[in-house]
């Protein structure tokens, strides 16, 4: 199984050393994220230029912030700059993120729109003699060659969809080469009842089933209690988002996620450290990889066996980073790289 690391932080330059360490340790890929203070494509290119073999991908770049052809151009340049090691992970974010953080109201029907968006990207990258695309959301007609010759000889740019709900996962699988699953989706109950069946129902681009990458919140410390608290804090953070509650609906954790959301709604100033106290140990085990340097490798191997049986080919370790300062975050990245083996056959 391929191993990867996602770098979900505003920290930037210190991640270059993390990237080099991950490459040396045998990791297959680095995923970069974005938010209002950071750009995933710029970060992926930067890390790619400071490494030689490890792949880089956006995990994810938000489609609603860029017109499709602007995204196509940026991704093509990133692929050329990294000598064919770049993949474009796309996401639609949540409605609250689009409207409150970015002030964007017009990204309706996000699942279907993202599928049309991905189709237009592929058409642009293949446009040797003009581009004509008429989809449900995007229409364009441009004469002449759009495809840059420097893409010739490089592997195709992979598009990776993402999502949490069934419709988004199904559409991602239909239009993309791979599907990246949010860390909450790694919960076995939801993975088995919703995510894996939704992906299996759809045929990917070119008539093939897309590969699947599973994100997993990961926390390692010599003090396991400390590692568990960090994981709890991350789960509390995620479950303050109303749309993520669907992951636990009908399961033993539904009441917990409802309680977290209700407490946060009643007191938005409540810290994630305080909310973390609502997350029980069993929930941490169901949603996270947590352990000491001695215990974590065995737990990773056990989780890999479970994922392989579900058709997953890539395990992406996500630092339990909520509440960490820059130095702590970078140290947590190195702790994962140092204590998790590289790719496993």
Image (cartoon, rainbow, N blue to C red):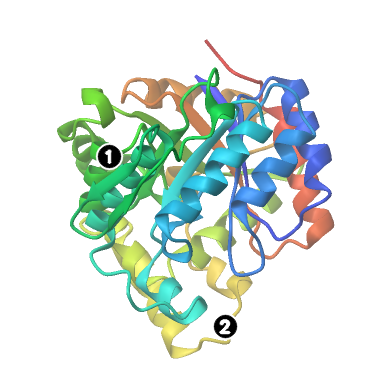
**Position of residue 77 measured from the top left corner of the image (x, y, whole percent):** 60, 40
Give the labeled residue for mark 2: 270
Which residue sits furthest front? Answer: 144
Query: Element type at marker 2?
Result: loop
Kindly check if marks 1 and 2 are in contact, taking CB atoms under 8 A apart as contact: no
Identify the residue at horizontal 42%, vertical 44% (top origin): 286
Residue highlighted by disc 1: 175
Residue 331 visible in the picture: yes
Relative depth, front residue between 172 and 288: 172
The answer to which quarter of the image holds residue 4 is top right
- Residue 339's spot in the image, x, y percent? 72, 29
**Are there few (<14), some (14-19), or many (20+) residues within 10 Å of tag 2?**
few
Tell me what residue is drawn at x 35 percent, y 79 percent.
105
- Residue sitting at the far left: 201
| Vertical comparison of 19 with 297: above or below | below
Spatial separation of the CA atoms under disc 1 and disc 2: 40 Å
Q: Residue at x 67, y 31 (%)?
A: 82
Mark 1 / mark 2, whichever is N-terminal: 1
Q: Is residue 171 above or below residue 338?
A: below
In this rendering, the label closer to the viewer, 1 or 2: 1
Q: Position of residue 119 (x, y in %)?
A: 30, 43
Q: Nearer the viewer, residue 95 or 323?
A: 95
Q: In which quadrant of the rendered view does residue 159 lie?
A: top left
Q: Position of residue 53 (x, y in %)?
A: 69, 21
Q: Nearer the viewer, residue 206 or 21?
A: 206
């Amino acid at each position: 199984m391929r191993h990867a690391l996602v770098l979900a932080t505003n920290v930037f330059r210190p991640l270059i050393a993390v990237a080099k360490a991950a490459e040396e340790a045998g990791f297959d890929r680095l995923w970069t994220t974005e938010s209002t203070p950071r750009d995933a494509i710029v970060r992926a290119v930067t890390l790619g230029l400071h490494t030689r073999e490890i792949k880089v991908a956006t995990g994810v770049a938000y489609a609603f912030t860029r017109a499709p052809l602007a995204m196509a151009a940026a991704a093509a340049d990133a692929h050329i700059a990294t000598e064919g090691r770049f993949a474009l992970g796309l996401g639609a974010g949540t409605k609250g993120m689009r409207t409150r953080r970015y002030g964007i109201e017009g990204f309706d029907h996000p699942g279907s729109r993202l599928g049309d968006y991905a189709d237009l990207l592929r058409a642009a990258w293949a446009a040797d003699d003009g581009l004509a695309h008429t989809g449900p959301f995007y229409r364009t007609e441009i004469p002449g060659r759009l495809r840059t010759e420097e893409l010739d000889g490089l592997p195709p740019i992979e598009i990776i969809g993402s999502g949490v709900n069934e419709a988004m996962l199904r559409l991602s699988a239909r239009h993309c080469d791979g599907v990246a699953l949010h860390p909450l989706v790694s919960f076995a109950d939801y993975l088995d009842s919703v995510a894996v069946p939704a992906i299996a129902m759809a045929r990917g681009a070119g008539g093939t089933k897309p590969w699947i990458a599973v994100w997993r919140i990961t926390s390692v410390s010599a003090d396991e209690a400390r590692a568990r608290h960090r994981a709890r804090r991350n789960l509390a953070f995620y479950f303050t988002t109303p749309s993520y509650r669907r992951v636990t609906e009908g399961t033993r954790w539904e009441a917990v996620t409802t309680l977290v959301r209700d407490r946060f709604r009643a007191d938005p100033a409540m810290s994630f450290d305080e909310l973390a106290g609502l997350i029980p140990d069993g929930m941490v085990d169901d949603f996270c990889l947590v352990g000491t340097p001695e215990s974590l490798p065995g737990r990773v191997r056990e989780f890999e066996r479970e994922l392989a049986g579900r058709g997953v080919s890539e395990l992406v370790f996500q630092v339990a980073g909520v509440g960490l300062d820059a130095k702590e975050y970078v140290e947590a990245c190195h702790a994962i790289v140092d204590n998790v083996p590289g790719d496993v056959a």
